[in-house]
Image: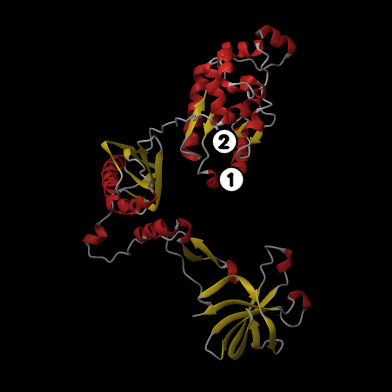
């Protein structure tokens, strides 16, 4: 449409000259942002979109649907109108994002054919010549192409159109060439002959780590995560990753972490190329050795031990317990960074094992209003109490919710006839009904 015609239709039209170079630069910056923040595989789809490969990383963002909604919100805040589609193939996602009905489209696995069928043929990214031929032969939707044999269809629309159709349906691979982040430290090794033994892979790991350490040292950085990619002879890739609790570029420590992942590498017919990338880095300055030279005793850094344990059982399984300013026992502790020394603990006597959720006690015998129980049943077993101490009264935190305005717990330390020591409490003060229902609960065990 001519500009004068458009202005005649809409008087307050926002009219600006096109700048394709600036648009391309903006898309490139968005792809770089996607690589750094969302997925290691992201690329520009000319001339108005992005490809983001969520395979293996969608759980880091709360799942596919949640990530897509966050992505739409991000685009709205940035001033863009966006449409997002998730599908099994890049071609299907490209088509649904541009020709689908909704701003957010998520195709279930193996539902690509059904999702693409009602879309126009133009959704397959065909050339103008192929689109003209499709209109000539009456092909309006992708569903019209599916029952036609590949040979006659190729003669009518061209071989490139068949390739696009197979890529969208998953019959032909369409790899995404990711946007390379020049700021991400990376090293590479190409081998003269393929390797497949653990010893040879370990040797290559050591060589790559030494090269990466020199690169990190020149930039004053330390690695917080590493991603090793091995290219097999058959074209497939083997990818393993490790993380550290603190920035480091110590080769021996990083090699020890990578060696824990060797068993996950399937060399197949052999690995012929390796690359090592540090996606997450942090500044790492020189270590101050003044205290060491002066003979002072330093607190040992637990980060190496934390990294080794996390490499075996998972990073979420390693943590410290830190105190929180709260009188309610289950709220008085929180999981914190295992390398961080927690603050001072209050002088309260608390059990070694504190249950995350108190467990109910049954058939409790106790003198009201302030005596410890004499007998109770817990987990199907009867306990006879021979000694007890308490109560320690804990009031509810009224500023959190109205139900805790009058809530009271009376805690007791009790010991049974076999020597077991437990921490139990009763809801309510024994006088006012608003303070609790007088039920008894087990909250922890000593020793």
* Front one among 381 and 169: 169
Left or right of 172? Residue 224 is: left
Q: Which residue is mark 1?
A: 63
Report if residue 17 is visible in the image.
no
Left or right of 369? Residue 88 is: left
Query: In the picture shown, does residue 421 fall above or below 443?
Result: below
Looking at the image, is mark 1 or mark 2 nearer the viewer?
2
Residue displayed at 57% across by 82% down: 422
What distance separates the C-alpha of mark 1 from that of mark 2?
15 Å
Q: Quadrant of residue 397?
A: bottom right
* Residue 172 x %, y %: 51, 29
* Residue 202 x %, y %: 28, 48
- Location of the N terminus (image quadrant): top right
Q: Quadrant of residue 277?
A: top left
* Residue 396 x %, y %: 67, 70
Query: In the picture shown, does residue 228 fall above or below 354?
Result: above
Mark 1 or mark 2, earlier in chain? 1
Q: Quadrant of residue 234?
A: top left
Label 2 Cα crowd, 10 Å radius (few <14 / some 14-19 / many 20+): some
Secondary structure of the residue carrying tag 1 is: loop
Q: Which mark is residue 248?
A: none
Query: In the picture shown, does residue 138 fall above or below 381?
Result: above
Q: Which residue is mark 2?
A: 88
Tell me whether circle 1 and circle 2 mark residues in contact (CB < 8 Å): no
Residue situated furthest right in the rendering:
433
Residue displayed at 46% across by 62% down: 319
Report if residue 119 is visible in the image.
yes
């Amino acid at each position: 449409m001519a500009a004068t015609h458009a202005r005649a239709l809409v008087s307050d039209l926002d009219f600006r000259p096109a700048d394709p170079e600036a648009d391309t630069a903006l898309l490139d910056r968005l792809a770089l942002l996607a690589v750094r923040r969302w997925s290691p595989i992201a690329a520009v789809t000319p001339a108005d979109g992005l490809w983001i490969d969520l395979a293996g990383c969608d759980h880091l963002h709360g799942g596919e649907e949640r990530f897509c909604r966050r992505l739409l919100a991000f685009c709205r805040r940035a001033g863009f109108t966006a449409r997002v589609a998730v599908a099994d193939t890049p071609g299907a996602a490209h088509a649904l994002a541009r020709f689908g009905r909704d701003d957010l489209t998520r195709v279930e696995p193996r539902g690509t054919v059904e999702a693409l069928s009602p879309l126009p043929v133009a959704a397959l990214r065909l050339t103008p010549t192929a689109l003209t031929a499709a209109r000539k032969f009456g092909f309006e939707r992708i569903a019209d192409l599916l029952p036609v044999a590949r040979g006659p269809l190729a003669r009518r629309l061209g071989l490139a159109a068949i390739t696009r159709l197979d890529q969208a349906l998953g019959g032909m691979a369409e790899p995404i060439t990711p946007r390379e982040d020049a700021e991400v430290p990376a090293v590479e090794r190409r081998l003269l002959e393929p390797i497949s033994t653990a010893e040879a892979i370990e040797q290559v790991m050591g060589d790559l780590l030494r090269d990466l350490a020199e690169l990190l040292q020149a930039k004053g950085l330390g690695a917080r995560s590493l991603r090793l990619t091995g290219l097999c002879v058959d074209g497939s890739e083997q990818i393993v990753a490790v993380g550290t609790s603190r920035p480091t570029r110590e080769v021996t420590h990083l090699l020890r972490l990578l060696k824990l992942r060797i068993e996950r590498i399937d060399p197949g017919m052999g690995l012929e190329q390796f690359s090592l990338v540090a996606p997450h880095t942090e500044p790492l300055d020189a270590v101050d050795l003044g205290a060491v030279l002066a003979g002072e005793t330093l607190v040992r850094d637990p980060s190496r031990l934390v990294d080794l344990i996390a490499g075996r059982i998972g990073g979420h399984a390693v943590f410290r317990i830190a105190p929180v300013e709260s009188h309610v026992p289950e709220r008085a502790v929180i999981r914190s960074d295992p390398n961080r020394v927690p603050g001072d603990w209050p002088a309260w006597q608390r059990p070694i094992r504190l249950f995350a959720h108190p467990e109910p006690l049954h058939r409790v015998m106790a003198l009201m209003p302030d005596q410890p129980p004499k007998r109770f049943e817990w987990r199907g077993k009867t306990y006879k109490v021979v000694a007890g101490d308490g109560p320690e009264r804990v009031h509810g935190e009224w500023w959190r919710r109205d139900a805790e305005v009058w809530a009271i717990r009376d805690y007791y330390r009790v010991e049974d006839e076999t020597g077991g020591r437990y921490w139990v409490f009763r809801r309510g003060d024994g006088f006012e009904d608003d303070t609790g229902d007088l039920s008894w609960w087990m909250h922890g065990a000593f020793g």
